[in-house]
């Protein structure tokens, strides 16, 4: 199975800050990497798919990029509603796998 | 737009079989999509269980494959999950979702395994 390792596991930042979460894949996944946002009591919601494509309706402050097997989700100008847990997920080969999650808190 | 809704018992006895159904509305289950089950134990991360295509083709997570059956009922526009020989470790919120970039998701249903 492809392992996805996210870092950090949690972070705290202020409104307006730029926040970056990384996800490292155990092998090449050819860009098939998606990012989700999960809020308490709600189903996860896709933010970014295929490394850098913004899901319809998602604010443009969310961006994704990759360098080899290292993927990054950046939140430019953190907003209060961005407090959530963020997961990466590979859709390159089954079994589809997820990172362990990064909890983002607002200071 | 497509919406998904999970249903099924919220409590299952140990060694029993967990059975859930995901109803698809606003679109056809026979569209060119795979349909997945994902679970999340309380306070933990996400685990993909398996997926099905409207033809009946399936892919399962090897970690659960011996206990999982996913089926589709095109006449009812829904698909189902059966997980056998459950233990407390199978207690989780179970979600259904569409596609390879899971979107949309159902709202999730908590299944507790307890006597």
Image (cartoon, coloured by chain):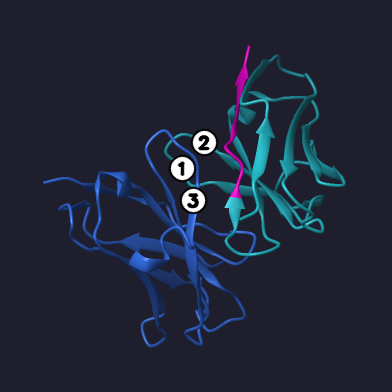
Chain colours: A cyan, B blue
Q: Which residue is mark 3?
A: B47
Q: Is residue B57 above or below residue B100?
A: below
Q: Is residue B52 above or below residue B93?
A: below
Residue displayed at 63% across by 23% down: A80
Work out which residue is located at the far right of the displayed protein and give it. A67
Categorize mark 1 by other alpha carbons within 10 Å: few (<14), some (14-19), many (20+): few
Residue A60: percent from left, percent from top = 80, 41
Labels 1 and 3 in the same subunit: no
Q: CA distance from mark 1 to mark 3?
A: 16 Å
Q: Which residue is mark 1?
A: A42
Residue A100: percent from left, percent from top = 57, 37
Which chain is indicated by disc 1? A
- The part of the chain drawn in magenta is A98-107
Q: Are marks 1 and 2 in contact (CB under 8 Å)?
A: yes
Q: Which residue is mark 2?
A: A39
Which chain is indicated by disc 2? A
Left or right side of A63 for A47: left
Q: CA distance from mark 3 to mark 2?
A: 17 Å
Work out which residue is located at the far left of the displayed protein and give it. B115
Residue displayed at 69% across by 25% down: A79
Left or right side of A43 for A103: right
The picture quadrant where one finds residue B82 is bottom left
Q: Is residue A103 above or below residue A106?
A: below
């Amino acid at each position: 199975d492809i392992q996805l390792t996210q870092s950090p596991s949690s972070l705290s930042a202020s409104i307006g800050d730029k926040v970056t979460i990384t996800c490292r894949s155990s092998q090449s996944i050819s860009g098939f990497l998606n990012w989700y946002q999960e809020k308490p009591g709600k189903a996860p919601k896709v933010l970014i798919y295929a490394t850098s494509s913004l899901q319809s309706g998602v604010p443009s402050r969310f961006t994704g990029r990759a360098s080899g097997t290292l993927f990054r989700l950046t939140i430019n100008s953190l907003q209060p509603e961005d407090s959530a847990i963020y997961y990466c997920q590979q859709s390159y080969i089954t079994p589809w796998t997820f990172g362990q999650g990064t909890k983002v808190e607002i200071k | 737009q497509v919406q998904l809704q999970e249903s099924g018992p919220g409590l299952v006895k140990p060694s029993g079989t967990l059975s859930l159904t995901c109803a698809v509305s606003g679109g056809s289950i026979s569209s060119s999509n795979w349909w997945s089950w994902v679970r999340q134990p309380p306070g933990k991360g996400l685990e993909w269980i398996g997926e099905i295509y409207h033809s009946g083709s399936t892919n399962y997570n090897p970690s659960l494959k011996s206990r999982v059956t996913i089926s589709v009922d095109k006449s009812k526009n829904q698909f189902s999950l059966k997980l056998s020989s459950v233990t407390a470790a199978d207690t989780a919120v179970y979600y259904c979702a569409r596609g390879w970039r899971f979107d949309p998701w159902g709202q999730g249903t908590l299944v507790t395994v307890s006597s």
